[in-house]
Amino acid sequence: LDKVGIDMIEAGDPSVSPSINAAMRKIASLRLNAEIVAHSMATRGCIDHARECGADRVAIFYATSKIHLETKLKKSPEEALQIICDAIRYAISLGLKVRFTPEDASRTDFEYLVRVCNAAIQAGADRISFADTVGIFQPHQMHDQIQALRERLLPVKIDLHCHNDYGLALANAMAGIRGGADCIHTTVNGMGERAGIPDLSETILAFHNLEG
């Protein structure tokens, strides 16, 4: 991945297991050109693990949709906002770069999404990852949502994390780039939970051969 010029390599979440933690430490020690990213819940303990394993950036995620806040996290929108900002500020204080992911962004109230993302940017995040967590968007929706976000957010890089539950992940990602996003999350062979996310090789070929 480093040799073909991948900018960022998300190597895992070091809090998940000792084996992933060890793998991340080994990857970080290779001193690759790519930025090494550690996935992390919005807690100090998880952020500490990311720093200790040698990651350059921490990808902090926290759900923002009404259904996730009420049924999974049992937090109010205001409580969630505070948790997110506190976690980002803490990561920044440790010298880490921060990407914030509003989990289930595609089902999040748009005005609240804008508010959360701008608060995250003000707290120090320089990347926002728009996550179509359950893969429900269609390309026209992704284009319009990213275009609207680009108009409303403070200066920031926008990543796209598109799931393939309906076979639309790459189409959604391409539409999101047209809408103003900067980066597509991919995996080797499209692997990932459920139906996965865009495949790296297909994404490269699609942009090389189809974009005009």
Image: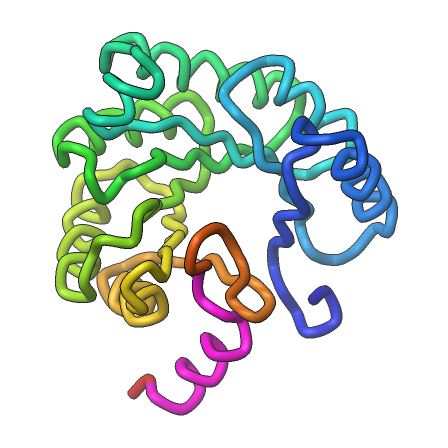
Q: Residue at x 24, y 38 (%)?
A: 153
Determine whether, in the image, residue 164 is placed left or right of residue 139: right
| Residue appearing at x 39%, y 58% in the figure | 182
**Going by the image, does 211 lie left or right of 137?**
right
Determine whether, in the image, residue 96 is placed left or right of residue 138. right
42 magenta-colored: no
- For image coordinates 31% across by 23% down, the residue present is 119
The answer to which image quadrant residue 207 occupies is bottom left
Magenta stretch, overall SS = helix
Residue 147's spot in the image, x, y percent? 18, 55
In the image, residue 47 lies at what x, y percent? Answer: 62, 22
> Looking at the image, what colour scheme do you see?
rainbow
The quarter of the rendered structure image containing the N terminus is bottom right
Q: Residue furthest front?
A: 194
Residue 74 lies, with reference to residue 9, above or below; the image says: above
Q: Which residues are magenta?
A: 197-210
Q: Position of residue 191 (x, y in %)?
A: 54, 61
Q: How many marks?
A: 0
**Which image quarter is the C terminus in?**
bottom left
Query: Front-most of 194 and 82?
Result: 194
Asked if residue 199 lies in the magenta stretch, the reply is yes
Residue placed furthest toward the bottom: 209
Vertical placement of 155 versus 192: above or below?
above
Q: Which residue is at a point 71% across and 37% down the rendered structure image?
A: 55
Residue 112, placed above or below residue 13: above
* Residue 68 image position (x, y, % from top left): 28, 26
